Image: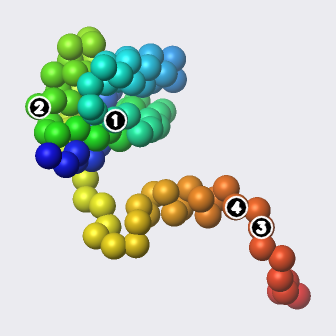
Amino acid sequence: MALTRFLVELYVKDSDAATHASSQAHESMASSDMRFHWSIYVPEDETSLLLLEAHCAEDVLDALEGSGLMLDRICATAAPETGGDALSRAARAAAAPPQEGPTAP
């Protein structure tokens, strides 16, 4: 059975809580076939977003709530059908050194 990507939203009060939530999520998935991809903290919204892969949303819910995290929302995400992972392409482009070439006057 293929893994599905899920975006998980958690309420967190500050960046320390976001870091703790990310660590808890990563640790809760270490002994399973779920995968933790990344997390981001949005201070203005007091929200932490986690991108994970699992067989189903229930697996995510069980793992994260079992580690003491209270989820606000879980959504399955859609990946492009062709052309690879858009997020990976964007990350590679951002990390690439600037290209030499003509400059605008």
Residue that mark 3 sits on? 98
Whole-number angstrom distance, CA of label 2 to CA of label 1: 14 Å
In contact (CB < 8 Å): disc 4 and disc 3 = yes
Q: From the viewer's side, name the closer residue of 5 and 105.
A: 5
* Residue at x 27% of width, y 47% of height: 5
Q: Residues within 10 Å of mark 3 (few under 14, many from 20)?
A: few
- Determine which residue is flagged by label 2: 58
Residue 60 horizontal side relative to residue 47, left or right: left
Tell me the amino acid under the disc marked 3: Pro
Q: Is residue 11 above or below residue 17?
A: below
- Mark nearest the camera among 3 and 1 is 1
- Distance, label 4 to label 3, CA atoms, is 6 Å
Q: Earlier in the sequence, mark 1 or mark 4?
A: 1
Mark 3 or mark 1: name the one nearer the start of the chain.
1
Disc 3 element: loop
Is tag 2's residue or tag 1's residue first in the polypeptide sequence? 1
- The percent coordinates of residue 89 (x first, y second) are 51, 63
- Which residue in the structure is indicated by mark 4? 96
**Picture quadrant of residue 59:** top left
Which of the numbered marks, if any, corresponds to residue 95?
none
